[in-house]
């Protein structure tokens, strides 16, 4: 599977996803891993100085300065006005021992961007080569031969940038030596050199002199008006330039957030999202930006930190968007739901995951909803599509591995785990998948020590703690299991979607006491319909059908109509006759929504049997017997065999019925109805055998009393 997905194919244009991964590696200081993707991008025709800069940094920090020099020079050729290039060149020359070139290049970098970092680099090189180099003047440092690229900023914006750069120089150097330069540039910015010294217009207007003086006053008023107009024009140019810069920055931030979402790098999304959302009040903020922020907040909530404030912001954005809620907005709202609640969204998720959709999130959400609904075949197809669209998203792959293991496909789970470990070795979701896989096999439990490169995610920590709880339950250590379960709940801040999903996992594995423990927590969302359905299913499994019926019926009325909840409600009505609901209509709706669901089909056969359609029920079951026989559920087989036994009893075939009941008890020893009916048939067969033996003895005695001539030969 890892090979089939072609997960490491290079993209000729040097894609944003690859660059985002390179940036992430650089930020974590993993320089050796930067070289391969950079070389691959350059080999496939990627352009731009950033690839040469990243590769030069990688080689420089792995003690290959001579190789680094080639790529640093290439970066300087393609971007001669980039101060970061000359910082790297200066460090390369310094590493090669060429002090004079290192100092010249550092001085040029400082001239381009006179900040503290460049000043410290210049001082560091001066201290390193104290005797062998001389400090270049500004004229000498400008003779390095690189030409500046023309920018696209407005003239006013460029002048404002010059002012800011001069102010930084003043803060880093002697204030008195530079103050005149700043005053001169301020005066130039506001037209001082053009119109001469300033005079107070109030004095001119209040002057009582007339004659030739009045003409001079008029000229000065005109000049003052021109100055005001020119100042307003300059302010407008500066404002427009700043707005254009803000719009460009907003577009860049949106691209970054979208790219990191596409590869599942939620730590980077969390870092970029506040800066992106800071543009919300700007004129350039669009509906698409609002939807992207909604989805990003929902993704961080569901897979990263479970912060309740994010839910509040998502709902606010949804209200603000209203009818303009598009793909990202609907995906974001679906992310806030538990798997049980998401089942009702299956038709909508199928529409979102259309063939022309290239985003994996809708396919993943559809797969999780189908898993909860019990539609394993459709869920497998949805997981495959999600992996094809997003082969490196760790939390998607971890869920797929868990799904494959849960349905008994250990080899399939192992293949997905290999892909996950290869794509995201430092992801906490890889650790979760390893733990879950160890529960399926006899492999030793993985080392839980976290490396320094392991990323942090409270939601992943909760998933890990939950897996440890399952392991403790498997080892019959209930107190340890509940301790791990409480830690998992704390990691997700007791948020309802996570608690409902925990319940589904525990209930599905048959750990009813642990599931009951969840319902006793203060944070359990008992007011939600999905929580009412969960409590009703728990009562049903514990045999309290009188309590289960009202809860399951209430959940059904509130559109909680997954296969499990529906089957429990149908079974409760079949057994107790309550609540009074149209049973056949309910079963028909469930079978149309979830076709080939064996529990529902078995319930339908029971309904036919109770309605007196015995032969029809038997035929209905026999047509599905091969699927029932292959089912891993012993309980399901036991129920089907019990129903077939009742059909045989209705035809008076006790021997055949007894054989079916014995097989039913063998498949599930806790099937009390089958056990009781088997005991009843055994008792009846014993009575019949006694009667038969008594009758035979009586016939034998009567035969002996007859005269020999009237006795029937024993062989006839």
Image: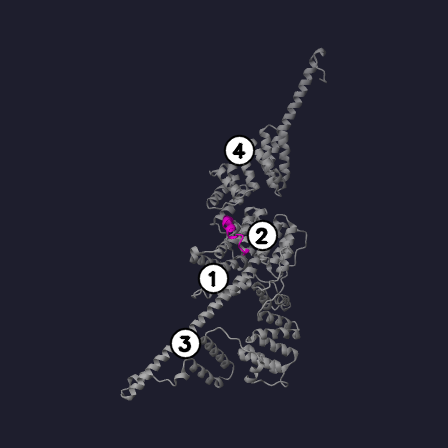
- How far is the residue under mark 2 from the one under mark 1? 28 Å
| Residue 50 seen by the camera | yes
- How far is the residue under mark 1 from the one under mark 4? 58 Å
- How far is the residue under mark 3 from the one under mark 4? 88 Å
Q: Secondary structure at mark 4?
A: helix
**Disc 3 target residue:** 234
**Disc 2 target residue:** 383
- How far is the residue under mark 2 from the one under mark 3? 57 Å
Q: Which label was assigned to residue 289? A: 1
Magenta stretch?
343-360
Residue 357: x and y in percent read 53, 55
Q: Which label was assigned to residue 610? A: 4
The reply to whether the magenta stretch includes residue 711 is no
Q: Nearer the viewer, mark 4 or mark 2?
A: 2
- How far is the residue under mark 1 from the one under mark 3? 31 Å
Labelled pair 2, 1 in contact (Cβ < 8 Å): no
Residue 716: x and y in percent read 71, 17
Tell me which numbered mark, 3 or 4, is placed earlier along the sequence: 3
- How far is the residue under mark 4 from the one under mark 2? 40 Å
Q: Secondary structure at mark 3?
A: helix
Callout 4: few (<14), some (14-19), or many (20+) C-alpha neighbours within 10 Å?
Answer: few
Residue 224: x and y in percent read 35, 81
């Amino acid at each position: 599977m890892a090979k089939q997905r072609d997960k490491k194919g290079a993209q000729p244009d040097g894609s944003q996803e690859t660059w985002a991964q390179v940036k992430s590696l650089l930020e974590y200081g993993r320089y050796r891993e930067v070289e391969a993707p950079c070389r691959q991008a350059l080999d496939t025709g990627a352009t731009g100085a950033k690839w040469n800069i990243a590769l030069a940094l990688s080689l420089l920090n792995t003690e290959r300065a001579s190789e680094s020099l080639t790529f640093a020079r290439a970066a300087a050729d393609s971007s001669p006005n980039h101060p970061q290039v000359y910082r790297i060149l200066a460090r390369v020359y310094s590493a090669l021992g060429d002090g004079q070139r290192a100092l010249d290049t550092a001085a040029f970098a400082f001239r381009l961007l006179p900040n503290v970092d460049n000043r410290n680099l210049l001082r560091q090189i001066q201290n390193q080569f104290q005797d062998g180099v001389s400090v270049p003047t500004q004229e000498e440092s400008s003779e390095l031969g690189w030409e500046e690229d023309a920018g696209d900023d407005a003239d006013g914006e460029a002048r404002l940038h010059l002012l800011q750069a001069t102010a930084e120089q003043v803060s880093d150097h002697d204030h008195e030596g530079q103050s005149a330069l700043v005053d001169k540039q301020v005066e130039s910015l506001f037209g001082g050199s053009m119109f001469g010294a300033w005079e107070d217009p109030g004095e001119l207007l209040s002057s009582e002199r007339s004659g030739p003086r009045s003409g001079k006053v008029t000229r000065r008023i005109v000049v003052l008006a021109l100055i005001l107009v020119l100042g307003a024009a300059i302010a407008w140019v500066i404002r427009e330039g700043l707005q254009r810069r803000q719009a460009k920055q907003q577009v860049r931030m949106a691209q970054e957030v979208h790219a990191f979402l596409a590869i599942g790098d939620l730590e980077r999304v969390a870092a970029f999202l506040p800066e992106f959302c800071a543009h919300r009040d700007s004129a350039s903020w669009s509906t698409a930006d609002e939807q992207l922020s909604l989805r990003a907040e929902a993704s961080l909530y569901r897979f990263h930190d479970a912060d309740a404030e994010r839910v509040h912001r998502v709902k606010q954005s949804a209200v603000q968007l209203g009818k303009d809620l598009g793909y990202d907005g609907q995906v974001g709202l679906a992310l806030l739901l538990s798997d049980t609640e998401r089942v009702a969204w299956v038709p909508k998720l199928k529409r979102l995951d259309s063939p022309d959709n290239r985003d994996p999130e809708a396919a993943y959400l559809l797969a999780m909803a189908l898993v909860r609904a019990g539609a394993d075949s459709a869920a497998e197809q949805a997981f495959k599509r999600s992996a094809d669209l997003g082969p490196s998203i760790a939390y998607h792959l971890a869920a797929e591995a868990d799904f494959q293991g849960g349905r008994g496909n250990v080899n399939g789970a192992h293949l997905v785990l290999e892909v996950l470990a290869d794509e995201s070795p430092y992801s906490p979701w890889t650790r979760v998948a390893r733990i879950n896989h160890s529960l399926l096999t006899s492999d030793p439990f993985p080392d839980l020590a976290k490396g320094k490169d392991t990323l942090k995610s409270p939601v992943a920590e909760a998933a890990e703690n939950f897996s440890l709880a399952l392991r403790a339950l498997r080892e019959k250590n209930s107190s340890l299991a509940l301790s791990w379960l409480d830690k998992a709940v704390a990691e997700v801040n007791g948020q309802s979607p996570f608690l409902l999903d925990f319940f589904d996992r525990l209930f599905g594995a048959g750990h009813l006491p642990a599931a009951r423990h969840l319902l006793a927590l203060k944070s359990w969302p008992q007011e939600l319909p999905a929580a009412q359905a969960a409590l009703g299913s728990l009562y049903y499994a514990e045999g309290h059908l009188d309590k289960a019926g009202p809860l399951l019926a209430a959940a059904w009325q509130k559109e909680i109509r997954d296969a499990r909840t529906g089957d429990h409600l149908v079974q409760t009505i079949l057994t107790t006759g309550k609540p009074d609901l149209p049973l056949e209509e309910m079963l028909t709706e469930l079978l149309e929504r979830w076709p080939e669901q064996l529990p529902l089909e078995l319930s339908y056969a029971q309904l036919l049997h109770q309605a007196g359609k015995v032969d029809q029920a038997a035929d209905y079951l026999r047509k599905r017997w091969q699927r029932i026989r292959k089912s891993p559920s012993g309980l399901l087989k036991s129920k089907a065999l019990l129903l077939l036994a009742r059909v045989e009893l209705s035809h008076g075939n006790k021997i055949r019925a007894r054989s079916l009941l014995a097989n039913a008890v063998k498949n599930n020893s806790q099937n009390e109805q089958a056990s009781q009916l088997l005991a009843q048939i055994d008792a009846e067969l014993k009575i019949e055998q006694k009667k038969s033996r008594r009758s035979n003895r009586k016939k034998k005695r009567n035969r002996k009393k007859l005269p020999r001539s009237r006795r029937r030969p024993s062989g006839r």
